[in-house]
């Protein structure tokens, strides 16, 4: 089915160079070249030619590039249909799970309310936290899965689904294990002076925008570097490979083994909860109501 290395090829083709593609993908140019080599070996095709001015697609590369979106979309639909067929005769709730939005909080909730749903089973459906594809995953609520559970303060996410808050996660920062702050058990915000703080660009999250406003107005010695609107593993990789600081969450402390997460003496937190479709069926709405009556806020 769909090979994630196709995304690297698309970025290289769009950007015209490994260096520019690396900036978009938040990985190193060397990693881009290795991924391209792996993809060409996988296909047994020469897709790009290196020139003095950048890269150029071969005729084979032009065909793969032309069909790339169809390949991704068709593969996703095929896998979703196969999963649906596999469980067509079951009474199930399908729950999305990913590295940044794991199903464990849903499981904790499930064991508090499952006595009201004795005929139901759970089916976990993995998905990828790709910053350029996460919105299409949210749009599959009600089709690919019944529920996601995750952090949500995003205007874009909330325009695509309903959200039941279940609690809050504290905002923290993460640094590489070699960073000067890595041994700290807690930070005052002034200890970030002179550092570059990676955080999502302005405009989608009120809470992140509030943090940015505070830093810009009251702590100008902290430099801010925009990340994509939604985190994925490439953002954590970039932090681990540089001397920069990443704005993160307490629930993401185990996402990247090369990073250390540190609490900060501030009061910022963000809600997490249950995401479900605008036109959810009756049984999903029953579960949401059960969760509303039992979940501590």
Image (cartoon, rainbow, N blue to C red):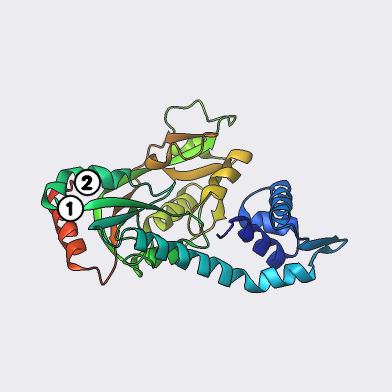
* Label 2 crowd bin: few (<14), some (14–19), many (20+), radius 10 Å: some
Q: Position of residue 44 (x, y in %)?
A: 74, 57
What residue does disc 2 label?
109
In the rendered image of this protein, does residue 185 appear above or below residue 105? above
Closer to us: 117 or 274: 117
For the point 55% across and 55% down, the residue is 226
The quarter holding residue 244 reads top right
Residue contact at pointers 2 and 1, CB within 8 angstroms: yes
Circle 1: element type:
helix
Q: Earlier in the sequence, mark 2 or mark 1?
A: 2
Res. 183 visible in picture: yes
Residue drawn at (53%, 36%), measured in percent from left and top? 175
Q: Which residue is mark 1?
A: 291
Task: Give the farthest residue toward the right.
Answer: 52
Identified at 38% across, 59% down, the residue is 83
Q: In the rendered view, does 119 fall on the left or right side of 176?
A: left
- Position in image of residue 133 (x %, y %): 50, 62
Side of 131 where 29 appears, left or right: right
Where residue 39 appears, as percent x and y from the top left, is 69, 55
Q: CA distance from mark 2 to mark 1?
A: 7 Å
Q: Nearer the viewer, residue 271 or 14?
A: 14
Q: Secondary structure at mark 2?
A: helix
The total number of labels drawn is: 2
Give residue 270's position: percent from left, percent from top.
34, 50
Q: Quadrant of residue 87?
A: bottom left
Q: Quadrant of the N terminus?
A: bottom right
Q: Quadrant of residue 242?
A: top right
| Residue 251 versus residue 210 in the image, above or below | above
Residue at horizontal 48 percent and vertical 54 percent from the top: 128
């Amino acid at each position: 089915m769909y090979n994630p290395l196709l995304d690297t090829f698309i970025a290289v083709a769009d950007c015209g160079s490994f260096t520019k593609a690396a900036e978009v993908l938040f990985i190193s140019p060397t990693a881009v070249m290795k991924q391209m080599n792996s993809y060409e070996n996988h296909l047994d095709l020469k897709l790009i030619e290196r020139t003095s001015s950048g890269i150029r697609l071969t005729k084979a590369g032009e065909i793969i590039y032309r069909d790339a979106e169809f390949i991704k979309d068709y593969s996703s639909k095929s896998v979703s249909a196969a999963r649906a067929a596999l469980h067509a005769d079951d009474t199930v709730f399908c729950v999305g799970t990913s590295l940044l939005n794991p199903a464990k909080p849903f499981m904790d909730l499930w064991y508090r309310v499952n006595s009201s749903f004795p005929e139901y089973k759970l089916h976990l459906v993995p998905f990828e936290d790709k910053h350029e594809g996460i919105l299409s995953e949210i749009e599959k609520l009600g089709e690919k899965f019944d529920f996601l559970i995750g952090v949500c303060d995003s205007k874009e996410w909330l325009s695509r689904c309903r959200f039941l808050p279940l609690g809050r996660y504290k905002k923290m920062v993460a640094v590489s294990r070699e960073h000067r702050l890595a041994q700290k058990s807690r930070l005052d915000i002034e200890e970030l002076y002179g550092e570059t703080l990676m955080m999502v660009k302005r405009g989608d999250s009120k809470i992140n925008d509030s943090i940015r406003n505070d830093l810009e107005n009251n702590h100008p010695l902290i430099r801010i570097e925009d990340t994509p609107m939604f985190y994925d593993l490439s953002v954590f990789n970039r932090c681990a490979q540089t001397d920069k600081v990443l704005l993160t969450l307490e629930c993401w402390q185990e996402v990247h083994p090369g990073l250390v997460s540190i609490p900060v003496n501030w009061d910022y937190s963000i809600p997490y909860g249950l995401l479900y479709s605008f036109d959810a069926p009756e049984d999903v709405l029953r579960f949401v109501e059960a969760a509303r009556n039992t979940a501590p806020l």
